[in-house]
């Protein structure tokens, strides 16, 4: 019965944490990190930086106007850059859009350690490709 007691403790702790979470502040922090990441981008670096901007409304517009595509991870290389102690990775992708020849590009983004298994070579992820620049990608 120890397992059920532990589960009950976890559920209570989760409920208490949820009550103490300032979701508006969490969203502000996420936007701040996105802006910080974009500001730290290196001019002339290859590929997309992983977001249209730190502005969620611009990202939504880019998502809606982007062409659906899939990207198969070819390689994953950590760069020397970090954002709030999270490594920025250069992900080489094979991009496939229905009816068009596939192509390779580099997609630069922060990847949390817990998410790294989703970014290993061979994994396929959904992307949106910007109509005016096929190397500019938005995850999703």
Image (cartoon, rainbow, N blue to C red):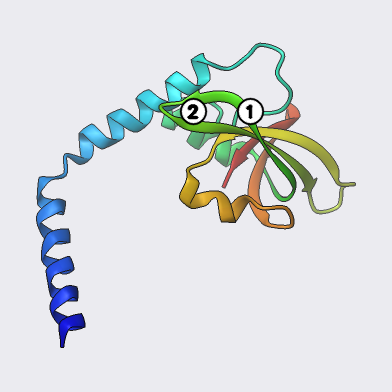
Q: Which residue is mark 2?
A: 58
Q: Is residue 30 above or below residue 10?
A: above
**Residue at the extreme right:** 101
Find residue 79 and name its label.
1
**Residue at the extreme front:** 2
Q: Name the spot of residue 13 as percent of width and height, x first.
A: 13, 60
Please name the residue shown 9% across and 56% down the image: 16
Nearest the viewer among 29 and 102 is 29
Please name the residue shown 42% across and 32% down the image: 56
Q: Left or right: 48 with respect to 84?
A: right
Q: Is residue 39 above or below residue 127?
A: above
Nearest the viewer among 88 and 48 is 88
Find residue 66 and name its label.
none
- Snapshot quadrant of residue 57: top left
Q: Is the Cβ of the residue at disc 1 closer than 8 Å to that at disc 2? A: no
Q: Name the spot of residue 43 as percent of width and height, x first.
A: 66, 11
**Residue at the extreme bottom:** 1
Choose the circle earlier in sequence order: 1 or 2. 2
Nearer the observer: mark 1 or 2; the answer is 1
Please name the residue shown 60% across and 38% down the image: 138
- Snapshot quadrant of residue 132: top right
Nearest the viewer among 65 and 105 is 105
| Label 2: which secondary element | helix
Q: CA distance from mark 1 to mark 2?
A: 26 Å
| Label 1 Cα neighbours within 10 Å, binned few <14 / some 14-19 / many ≥20 | some
Please name the residue shown 63% across and 28% down the image: 79
Q: Name the spot of residue 86 as percent of width and height, x first.
A: 47, 33
**Quadrant of the snapshot with the N terminus:** bottom left
| Label 1: which secondary element | strand
Q: Name the spot of residue 110 as percent of width and height, x first.
A: 53, 35
Q: Is residue 119 above or below residue 15?
A: above
| Label 2 Cα neighbours within 10 Å, binned few <14 / some 14-19 / many ≥20 | few
């Amino acid at each position: 019965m120890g397992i059920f007691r532990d589960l009950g403790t976890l559920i209570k702790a989760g409920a208490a944490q949820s009550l103490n979470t300032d979701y508006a502040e969490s969203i502000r922090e996420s936007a701040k990190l996105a802006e910080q990441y974009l500001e730290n981008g290196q001019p002339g670096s290859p590929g997309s930086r992983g977001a249209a901007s730190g502005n969620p409304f611009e990202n939504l517009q880019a998502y809606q106007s982007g062409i659906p595509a899939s990207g198969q991870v070819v390689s994953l290389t950590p760069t020397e850059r970090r954002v709030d102690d999270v490594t920025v990775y250069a992900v080489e992708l094979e991009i496939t859009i229905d009816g068009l020849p596939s192509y390779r590009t580099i997609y630069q983004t922060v990847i949390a350690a817990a998410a790294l298994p989703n970014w290993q070579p061979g994994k396929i992820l959904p992307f949106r490709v910007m109509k005016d620049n096929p190397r500019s990608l938005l995850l999703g």
